[in-house]
Amino acid sequence: MTRGPTRRNALKIMGAGIALPLGILGLRAIPGLPEPVRWSGETLGAMSSMTLWHTDPTVARRAINLMLVEVDRLENVFSLYRGKSEIRRLNLDGHLARPSRDMVTVLDHSRQIAEASGGAFDPTIQTLWQFYASRGVSASGMLLPQDLARRDAAVALIDYAAISATSREIRFDKPGLAISLNGIAQGYITDRITEILGNEGFENAVIELGETRALGATPNGDPFAIGVVNPLAPGFIAQDVALCNAALSVSGGYGMQLDRAGTHHIFDPATGQSANRLTQVAVTSPKAVWADALSTAIYVAGEGAAPGLLAGYPKSGAILWRNDGSTVAL
């Protein structure tokens, strides 16, 4: 018997035709310099790639294989879809003994950005995801009275302060709580891979694991040019962002549509509805984990909150796309 699309696959199908991933632009062959070695695939449900330069391509290919082992290890921590991952066990049981250092570190980053953003970023948003997943893909986006009651109950559970995390145990202090770290774990994994490559002697690489981080510059010394989509026409590039030893994260509701009425995957924890103050946010920062969480927080909180959030993370900046089509760089 052939199964119909799962909730996860349905969301991918709906988003596939409208979302163009970030991409490295202008990587033409440079005479006298090594050709890049590239891997592409999927991590944490996102299109991903690693592009490395080395005088010996065999060394670069071997490094990519080693990095894929590390990515797999981290997916066993953060993936919501692997049955025995740490985050799945935590969500099922409400507590997790002897968590990995990775999980504790990411939860610590999550708490910091949640506090700085007044809850606009909140890892306990998973209760809303569970609500929308149980509804299935809707054509109209209309919520029946019983749906509204269930959504409000999910919103009432959202509370980042109800997570206690130490190296000995992570515990939910509120029954029914559930977390998703998809708004920050991809950045953490991107940082981890980039930093390992740097420690292994690589000087030129671009890692795109849901978020993008550049190690060094191109082999000829120019910054990497990363294309960012036009949120009003997501099949096209709006502009390039130059990256050199920095990270880039982009948040936009066009990336995953939940219904034909415009409901999307970036929820406002205060309302349970899709955030709509901006159409897209691109954040650059020294670390992908910062850029990842900041782009989500600013997208939800809006333009007024952006300067204060960026000020808390040195050397971070943002480009905001407003609903009227204009942009502002901060």
Image (cartoon, grey):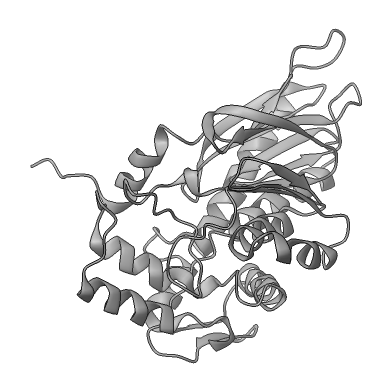
Q: Residue at x 66, y 72 (%)?
A: 101
In the image, farthest residue toward the bottom: 173
How many numbered markers are drawn? 0
In the image, farthest residue toward the left: 1
Q: Is residue 137 above or below residue 68?
A: below
**Lateral position of residue 183 relative to residue 313, left or right:** left
Q: Position of residue 110 (x, y in %)?
A: 64, 71
Residue 177 position by quadrant = bottom left
Q: Is residue 76 above or below residue 200?
A: below
Q: Residue at x 88, y 55 (%)?
A: 315
Q: Position of residue 309 (x, y in %)?
A: 76, 66
Residue 231 position by quadrant = top right
In this view of the protein, which residue sits in the foreground, 156 or 325?
Answer: 325
Q: Position of residue 20 (x, y in %)?
A: 53, 33
In the image, farthest residue toward the top: 31
Q: Residue at x 49, y 36 (%)?
A: 19
**Lateral position of residue 31 relative to residue 59, left or right:** right
In the image, farthest residue toward the right: 221
Which quarter of the rendered picture does the N terminus lie within? top left
Q: Residue at x 43, y 62 (%)?
A: 80
Q: Is residue 18 above or below residue 149?
A: above
In this view of the protein, which residue sits in the foreground, 235 or 194?
Answer: 235
**Lateral position of residue 180 relative to residue 111, left or right:** left
Residue 311 position by quadrant = bottom right
In this view of the protein, which residue sits in the foreground, 180 or 234?
Answer: 234
